[in-house]
Amino acid sequence: MFAVRLNSKIFLVLSVGFIAGVLGLAGTAQAELKVDVTRGTVKPLPIAVTKFIGNGPQEIQLGRRISHVIRADLARSGLFDPIDEKAFIEVERSLETVPRFQNWRILNAQAMVQGRVAVLSDGRMKVQFRLWDVFAQQQMVGQVYTTVTSNWRRIAHIVSDAIYKRVTGEEGYFDTRIVYIAETGSQIRRIKRLAIMDQDGENHHFLTDGSSLVLTPRFSPSRQEITYMSYHGNVPRVYIFNIDTGRQEVLGDFPGMTFAPRFSPDGDSVIMSMAESGNTEIYTMDLRTRKVRQLTRHSAIDTSPYFSPGGKRVVFNSDRSGTQQLYIMNANGSGVKRISFGKGRYATPVWSPRGDLIAFTKFTGGRFYIGVMGVNGKGERLLTEGFLVEAPTWAPNGRVLMFFRESPRGTGGEKDSKLFSIDLTGQNEREIVTPMDASDPAWSPLIP
Amino acid sequence: MRIKSLSYLVAALFLATACAETMQDGGAGRGSGGNQQAASSVKPGTGRDFVINVGDRVFFEFDKSSLSSDARSQLEKQAAWLKKFGSVSLTLEGHADERGTREYNLALGERRANSAKDFLVALGIAPNRIRVISYGKERPAALGQNEAAWRQNRRAVTIVAGASGS
């Protein structure tokens, strides 16, 4: 077909260790430093991320790059305020001696990160880091990783995740990727390509060449696979894309258009819609046995299905009441129950990885909104709005959402389409910069 | 002589208009004609004949797939032409405006295309001549963030193929 081979050794060959505290300062002591991510507005924690030290140009360059990526990750989270390096009074020259905390207290740094890169004789590198509570004068976490030097960017994200987790108590989400649709050309004949990148927009690759219209890619939770919809050969169907081999395969042999695919939480089946003779129903397909099961039987449009984290229930949208609303059913199709009752149309429900919330797109009064509600439909909160905002996707820690936003460009009817992330609190909305227009983002799980 | 060249000019102007519409349509459809003046310049039984002399599309209300009386009379004209040129097969494209979510609009476009298909079949067109495809909001015919553009985009377009002209 139109395979664009992506050479991605994404499994990190990595050995991890913990490094002990320095000079009897126990690393196990409980530090006071804590950021509560559940509050509406958080004052970002001032943190000093020093250049990772090393000997020789290669180690020094790797160290500089790694600390730069960590700083950017932490700043983008909105929970940390990395202090400008230019303000640093002194650089730490050793990982084995206690930092001169007074130099960091003066800058009001609450936390300090230091690290070291050592390139080994076999060409791999060893990266160590320590996170310090500056005021308690304690090490909060210390780790060492050994891997090939080309993994420096992933190591930086893994260090960021370790810092985030230690300070907030929540899992991080920096060592993740985004698959999305890259868009070019006029709206009339838009060219759309599958594209993949790290969550910070780096390591960008196109997976398809734009010869076929492609839509709505989603990651497998367990394999290096993406499910998406393609108009290949002018026959709109759900496909599976293997990221390692570039191989694309149509999923099943359905008489009608298949679309809106999502993997089950175990990655062993895909749930999707099929439209035939003017009626859209929800189906699952077991990826090993290829057995197909119809879940809904209703003359309405039933689409955008999404499994609960345990796989026992499905949330979807249906216009069976007259307009699009959100419904939950059991994974076998029984017990359908409407959960959205607010004003307007509700669509694209996505179940939080924590299980307690459903994010959605809402259309009312000529505007689109991204919001969340409880699984019982209660406690609706709208996080952001616009001419068009659509398709929320959860970061694996359930604290951040990504979505796309279309805005009219000029008066000719053309539009800009961009990706944004926003905290569950509705704070910290940020554009994810992409090389061209972008839509339909899907967040990966934490990379294994 | 003079009158004849004028009528050629009129036909040429009309074709130019049709071409402009085709470009704007991005191949999803070809204009929305229905002008008897051009009949003489277009080969009967062709896709161009269908677009110009019959009209290739019907329109829908927001989030609806029911056929208006205008839509039904348009489809009656299409059915008459399709009976006359019985070897022609057709694709019915269903489309939606941009004021909806992508997946729902794919379903809505499929529903609209089938709404038109069912009507043609009821008028005696064999279902095996008709293929249906939905583009949802992916292939607008008109650009613009206003009701005038959205109205043109909520449509089912009949694309005829295999026209022999016989």
Image (cartoon, coloured by chain):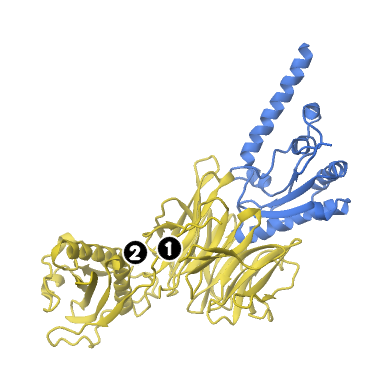
Residue at mark 2: chain: A
Residue positioned most to the top: B1
Number of marks drawn = 2
Residue at 22 percent of width and 88 percent of height:
A29
Q: Position of residue A258 (x, y in %)?
A: 65, 64
Q: How far apart are marks 2 and 1 (CA)?
A: 10 Å
At numbered mark 1, what does the secondary structure look like: helix, strand or loop?
strand
Residue B50, percent from left and from top: 78, 38
Q: Is residue A361 visible?
A: yes
Residue contact at pointers 2 and 1, CB within 8 angstroms: yes
Amino acid type indicated by mark 2: Arg
Chain identifier of the blue chain: B
User: Which is more toward the observer, A121 or B116?
Assistant: A121
As helix, strand or loop, the secondary structure at mark 2 comes to helix
Report which quarter residue B108 is drawn in.
Answer: bottom right
When asked about the image quadrant of residue B144, the answer is top right
Answer with left or right where residue A9 lies relative to residue B143: left
The residue at which mark 1 appears reads as A421
